[in-house]
Image: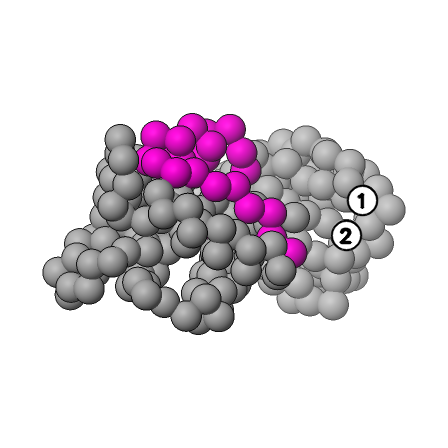
Amino acid sequence: MINILVAEDDIRILRLISDFLKKEDYNVYTAKDGQEALEIFDKENISLVVLDIMMPIYDGWHVCKELRKESNVPILILTAKDSDLDELFGFNIGADEYISKPFNPNLLIARIKNLLKRSEVLSNEVKDEHTLTYEEISINLDTKLMKIDNEHIELKPKEYDLIVLFIKNKGRIFERDNLLDLVWGYDYIGDPRTLDTHINRLRNKLGSKSHLLKTIRGFGYKFGG
């Protein structure tokens, strides 16, 4: 369920927006002043905020600034002020959309849906930047943990470097010397058999997916493909 917070001191407008949102199956939280809006936001998992400017206690500008200190939640500014300077100010302090009163409720809903869709896309992009996946294998690039079939598996530093290299280059055949250069460095002068040891350990940790890490006789190794 998507939670939307509507902060508006005009009860008639508050009910109108709330009714239209509920018809779209959104869960709606309402606030009649800026302080109440901040309190609700702190307690609930809010997906989007519709924020009036002229409210008691804290106005919408103050609430918007406070929200932006801790969250990237989409904020739609709703105001009776119809000024380019006000709109520019709203965007500068972190608002994502701006609509002036009086407004068409259907247009408001359309803009809310657009903001939610855009927010979901950005959220997925951020998630993708931090996660590397192939089939049921997923690597968290922040924690450096591998997850296979929802089971977390800890990796040694070189095991992590190898699996990330393999997944990013799935289907490519790596010669042994090439892997040593890429993972251990061009100046590595240790035992080249350390590569075989790490490959074997990585295969063991891959478990049911170990078949993806293939030995290509006379050449080296390939992952997937």
Q: Is residue 19 left or right of residue 194?
A: left
Residue nearest the observer in this picture, 34 or 212: 34
The kind of residue tagged 2 is Glu
Residue 136, numbered circle = 2
Q: Secondary structure at mark 1?
A: loop
- Residue 11 pos. (x, y %): 41, 46
For the residues labelled 2 and 1, the Cα–Cα distance comes to 6 Å
Q: Is residue 45 left or right of residue 218?
A: left
Residue 10, numbered circle = none
- Residue 199 pos. (x, y %): 72, 44
- CA neighbours of label 2 inside 10 A, class few (<14), some (14 to 19), many (20+): few
Q: Which residues are magenta?
A: 25-48
Q: Note whether residue 166 is visible.
A: no
The kind of residue tagged 1 is Asp
Vertical placement of residue 217 versus 180, above or below = below
Cβ–Cβ under 8 Å for marks 2 and 1 = yes
Which quadrant of the structure image shows residue 37? top left
